[in-house]
Image: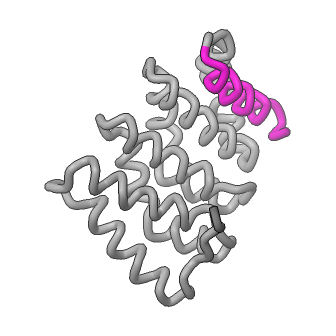
Amino acid sequence: MRASSPPPEEDVQGLLEGLCRVLSSPGRNAAARLQALHHINTLSAHSDATRNSVTTHAVVPLTTLLSDADVNVHCEAASAIGNLVHGSPARAARLIEAGVVGPLMNLLRERHPLTLTRASLALGALLRASVACRQQLEVYGRETLLPLMLSHNQQVCDGAEYAILGLYGGG
């Protein structure tokens, strides 16, 4: 499968505005939200300039969708957040200021393995990029993540380990 290249920057702005309208429309079903999130997640894995545009446009709907009842929707939102951070303390700070940490921690109370994995990976990315996030989650994060490392699901264990390692120094 060929890696897709992002559209030109001026096209990204219009695309993001349209995708965010879909995500923010209360009447849209989960399939429509999920499709829009797939596109946002794809864009969130491109250049820093594209990631910055996605963060600017999509931070509010992504934060809201972390609390979506549909497992696939909140997992895709968590995945996009992890991709957006990509080692950038500035983007991590922006996402943290938007309030993503609380909903991500709430997802760690779920039982669905994909939810636990995606939330752990997104938190791990934030923890690696942000000293403030590490300080904020020093105790509660450890207490929540360590039990996940005992999961019978290897992906959940791996995601929790990634987050724990991020909690202890960003490594």
In depth, the one of 101 and 152 nearer the eye is 152
Across the whole image, how many numbered discs are drawn on residues? 0
**Direction from residue 10 to residue 4 in the image, left or right:** right
First to last magenta residue range:
153-171
Inspect the magenta stretch and tell me whether residue 66 lies in it. Answer: no
**Direction from residue 97 to residue 147 in the image, left or right:** right
Name of the residue lying farthest toward the front: 1
x, y percent for residue 150: 66, 10
**Direction from residue 71 to residue 170 in the image, left or right:** right
x, y percent for residue 135: 70, 35
Inspect the magenta stretch and tell me whether residue 163 lies in it. Answer: yes
Q: Quadrant of residue 121?
A: top right
At 31% from the left edge and 54% from the top edge, which residue is drawn?
A: 33
Q: Quadrant of the N terminus?
A: bottom right
Q: Quadrant of residue 149?
A: top right
At 62% from the left edge and 12% from the top edge, which residue is drawn?
A: 151
Q: Quadrant of the C terminus?
A: top right
**Direction from residue 109 to residue 61 in the image, left or right:** left
At 65% from the left edge and 67% from the top edge, which residue is drawn?
A: 3
